[in-house]
Amino acid sequence: MYDFHTHFIPEGVMEWVKEHKETIHAEWVKKEKDKEEFLIVNQKWGFELKKSFLDLTLFLNEQLKEGVHHSVISPIPQLFMYEFPEEITAELSGVYNDSLARLVQSFPEKLSALATVPLNNPDKAAQILTDAMGKGLKGAIIGPGAANHMLSDEFFIPFFEEADRLKAIVFIHPLLSEDPRLKRRMMPNLIGVPWETTICATDLLLSGLIDRFPNVKILFAHGGGFLPYQIGRIEKGYEEWEAVSKNLTSSPKEYLKRFWYDNVLWEQASIDYLVRIVGEDRVVPGSDFPFDLSVWPPNEKHCKGASSLIDF
């Protein structure tokens, strides 16, 4: 079994975070006595530092115990650092990517990895993506935007040009929504995370960006947010409004089949629908391990997109 959606923090990355704790406003908070400390970055990106995030032996044993024979590790979104000066973002990207490259080189049969890049500087992001893939990483995990730009904006063209040249995987993973209406009952995570993916995915689809850069392998987290399940509404808009259709050479339903999706959806009926509308070869098994809302163990039923997405 493959697990395309896992997160890990190598030792070198945590050392960097501790060394720069004042710059990035990092703090370690004990919230509950039966839980590990929470790492909070810049007073908003908090998560429990479970041992599985930090202990590679434990991480690999947990995967093996559940029958996962190969895991794709991604940096954690809380450490994307897009809101900081680009020098900080680039420095941590280099540390993270070098650390992951060493892990992959040590366990090539068990691990692949994606890079993190300073998306707040697309030219630098392109350079760091090239460097990371030269060291064996398969592409990059990025947020749904940065520096107040959507991913379809011209601002990001240098990054997508290089990702297209390299035929890179670009795993789009949301951050918590900062919509003020959601600041209660864990809604920034529960619906805010897939909502951020929905906005990004819909914008990318309607922009025609994948016609411009057909070699980029765009993978959406959490089943593509809400987009696949509202594609009928997008399709109707395509039929009615030029503002929806003007950048497209075929229908939204056809474009939907040109992306990839993990199956971190928790409901088999939702996975079955996704597979039916985009095809088995566009859905990959994932878990989001070891975050609280992970699907554990991952579910590989009807998800056959591994071979078309990544070369192991």
Image (cartoon, grey):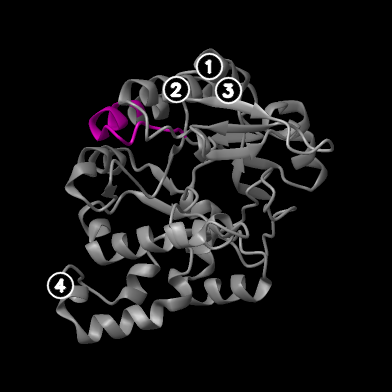
Looking at the image, tell me whether mark 3 or mark 2 is earlier in sequence order: 2
Q: Which residue is mark 3?
A: 105
Q: Which residue is mark 1?
A: 16
Q: Which residue is mark 4?
A: 246
Q: CA distance from mark 4 to mark 3?
A: 45 Å
Is 248 left or right of 92, judged from the image as shown? left
- Disc 3 versus disc 2: nearer the observer: 2
Residue 68: numbered disc: none
Is 193 left or right of 205, judged from the image as shown? right
Query: Is residue 282 visible in the rendered structure shown here?
Result: no
Looking at the image, tell me whether mark 1 or mark 3 is earlier in sequence order: 1
Q: Which residue is mark 2?
A: 92
Q: CA distance from mark 1 to mark 3?
A: 21 Å
Range shown magenta: 115-128
120 in magenta: yes
Looking at the image, tell me whether mark 1 or mark 4 is earlier in sequence order: 1
Q: Secondary structure at mark 4?
A: loop
Expressed as whole percent of the image width and height from the top left, the position of residue 280 reads: 54, 67
Quarter the C terminus occupies? top right
Q: Quadrant of residue 134?
A: top left
